[in-house]
Image (tube, rainbow, N blue to C red):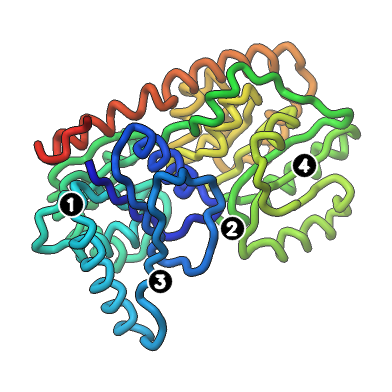
Amino acid sequence: MKIMLLVSTMGSGEAERVAATLVNVWAERGHEVTLVATYSKHAPCFYAISDKVRFVQLAEVVGEGKRGAMHYLSRLKTLRAMIRDARADVIVSFLTNVNIMTIVATLGMKVPVIACEHSNPAANERTKLWRLLCRYTYPRASLLTVLTDSIAASFREMVPAAKHIEVVPNPLPEELLAQGDVPVEYQARKRIVSVGRLNTQKQFDMLISAFAKLAAKIDDVDLYIWSEGNGRKALEAQIASLGMTQRIFLPGSTPTPWQEMKRARAFAVSSRFEGLPMALMESIALGVPVVSFDCPSGPRELTRDGRDGLLVPPGDADALVDGMTRLLLDDSLCEKMGRRAAVSVRERYGLQAVLPKWDQMFSRVGPGVAPR
C-alpha cells in the first residue's frame, strides 16, 4: 500500500512525534510511505525517520518568487501534482491548516483522505474563518479522526455534515515501549518537570506562580520547563521578578525528553485546554506521577478520571500547589501511582492498541487500500 502523510513541519512538536512514529512503523510493515512537510523548508527532522520513508519538504519543491495568495495557489498546485504522481492509495493529513489544504488539493481526485485533528474546537478558540473552512471542507474527507470522545462531540456540532468521525488516540513511540519497565531516576534535589510550547495555552505563568509558593515551603525542589515558544521572554521576566532564577529553569528543547522526565519527582500540566498531550502520556508511561489541571480533553482520559494521577480544578493555582506538595512529600503515593499508571497507559495507547484502528480505517476507505 502507498501511504502519504502530510504534516506542517517535522520540528519538536507533539504532532510531529506522532507522524514520525506512524510513518516508521508503516514503512517497517512493508508499505511504501512518503512523509511531506508542507510548510517547513531546509529543516531537518527533529525525530528520527526510517531510511525506508521518503521525506519531502513541499516548500523546497514550490520554490521562490511568489507571495501571498499566489504563493498559496502555487503550493496547492504543486501538492496536487505530487499526490497525483505518487499514486498514493491513501492520504493522511495532520492538523487543521494541513487538513484543509490537502482536502482542497485533492478535489476531484479519487484518492481517500483521512484528516486528523489533534485539538478540541470547543476549547482552542478557533476564529470564525477557521470554523467555516472546517465546516465546508471536512465533509469532503473520507474520514475525520479525533483523539477523544469529547472532541468527537465538539466536531459533530461544528461539522454536522462530516461523513465519518473516528476516535483514534495518538500512539506511544515504539522506542519508549521498547524500554520496558523503566525506573524513575531521582536526583539529589527533587524536580518537577513540564514539557510544552511556551505559549498561552500551556499557562506556564500560572505554573511558575504556583511553584514559587511551593518553593517558599520546600527547599529541595526545582522546576524545569522544557521546550521553546514566543512566550519565553515574558516567562523569564516573571521568574526574575519572583526571585526564582536559581529554582526555575527554561532549558529549551531537548532531544532526550524521556531522560528529563525520568529525573522528575512529578510531571505538572497547567494547560487551559489540550487534545491528548503526548508529553503527559509519555511521562505516565515512564512511571512518573502527574498532577494536572482537569482541563478540557486529555488529562482526564489519560489518568482514567484521576485514578492514575492527581487532577485539580482548572485554573486553581492553590490546588496545583497542593497537588505538587502531595507528590513531593508522599513517597508511597508516588511509587504506587507511577507503576499503576505506566501499566494502564501502555496497555491503552501502545502501538498494539492503536495500529489496528488504522488498519480498520484503511480498509474502510476503500478495498484498494486494505492493509497487507
Amino acid at dot 3: Ala
Which residue corresponds to the image point at 19% horizontal and 60% vertical from the top-left? 137
What distance separates the C-alpha of mark 3 from that of mark 1? Answer: 24 Å
The image quadrant that residue 237 belongs to is bottom right
Looking at the rendered image, the quarter that the C terminus falls into is: top left
Nearer to me, 202 or 7: 7
Which element carries disc 2, helix, strand or loop? loop
For the residue marked with disc 4, what is the amino acid? Leu
Mark 3–mark 2 CB contact (< 8 Å): no
Residue under circle 4? 223
Q: Foreground residue, 160 or 94? A: 94
The residue lying at 56 percent from left, 52 percent from top is 46
Residue 67 spot, x, y in % from top left: 38, 86
Q: Residues within 10 Å of mark 1 (few under 14, many from 20)?
A: many
Residue 198 in the image, given as x and y percentages of width and height: 62, 56
Front residue of this view, candidates 219 and 17: 17
Q: Which residue is mark 2?
A: 199
Measured as percent of width and height from the top left, residue 120 is found at 38, 47
Tag 2: amino acid: Asn
Q: Please name the residue shown 84% across and 34% down the image.
A: 221
Helix, strand or loop status at disc 1: loop
Q: Where is residue 25, by image quadrant?
A: top left
Residue carrying label 1: 141
The mark found on residue 59 in the picture is 3
Q: Nearer the viewer, mark 3 or mark 2?
A: 3
Query: Is residue 274 among the parts visible in the rendering?
Result: no
Using the image, determine if residue 212 lies above or below residue 350.
below
Q: Are marks 2 and 4 in contact (CB under 8 Å)?
A: no
Secondary element type, mark 4: strand
Which badge, 3 or 1, comes first in the chain's sequence?
Answer: 3
Residue 186 visible within the image: yes
Q: Residue furthest bottom?
A: 65
